[in-house]
Amino acid sequence: MKATKQMKCCICEIEIDNGMDYHNPTPLGKDVCCTYCNITKVLPARLKNLGNRLDKVQPQVAKQLVLPFGEGVL
């Protein structure tokens, strides 16, 4: 994203001065966030969401791995 005006972090509301310091705040907000919030809040939230999705998919994947080799292989 190219900065066209002064923007604020949608999480901590600090003004972002550097045009290269903008990050996508999804899933915690809209617009942009600063590097600090990206590292300390946004990325951990994304990893947590990914872990939750993997927990739901894992039994399906394990079943696919077991079936070709027979029951109880894993």
Image: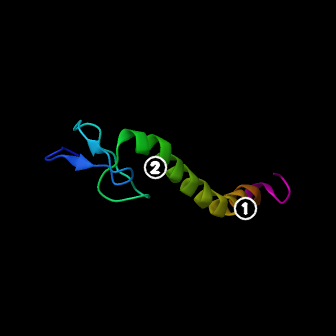
The residue drawn where x is 61% and y is 54% is: 51
Query: In the rendered view, does 16 fall on the left or right side of 3?
Result: right
- Residue extending farthest right: 72
Q: Amino acid at mark 1?
A: Lys
Residue at position x 33%, y 59% in the image: 30
Give residue 73's position: percent from left, percent from top: 83, 52
Which residues make up the magenta segment? 68-74
Residue 11 x/y as whole percent: 39, 53
**Dot placed on the residue nearer the N-terminal end, 2 or 1:** 2
* Nearer the camera: disc 2 or disc 1: 2
Q: Along the line of sight, which residue is nearer the eye, 6 or 42?
A: 6
Figure quadrant of residue 65: bottom right
Q: Amino acid at mark 2?
A: Val
Q: Residue 69 location, x and y as percent? A: 78, 54
What residue sits 52% from the left and 52% below the top? 45
- Label 1: few (<14), some (14–19) or many (≥20) C-alpha neighbours in 10 Å: few
Q: Which mark is residue 63?
A: 1
Give the main secondary structure, helix, strand or loop, of the magenta stretch: loop
Q: Is residue 36 above or below residue 24?
A: above
Label 2 residue SS: helix
Against 16, residue 64 (above or below) is: below
- Does the magenta portion include 15? no
Residue occupying the far left of the picture: 4
Query: Position of 28 compared to 50: left or right?
Result: left
Q: Position of residue 71 (x, y in %)?
A: 84, 60
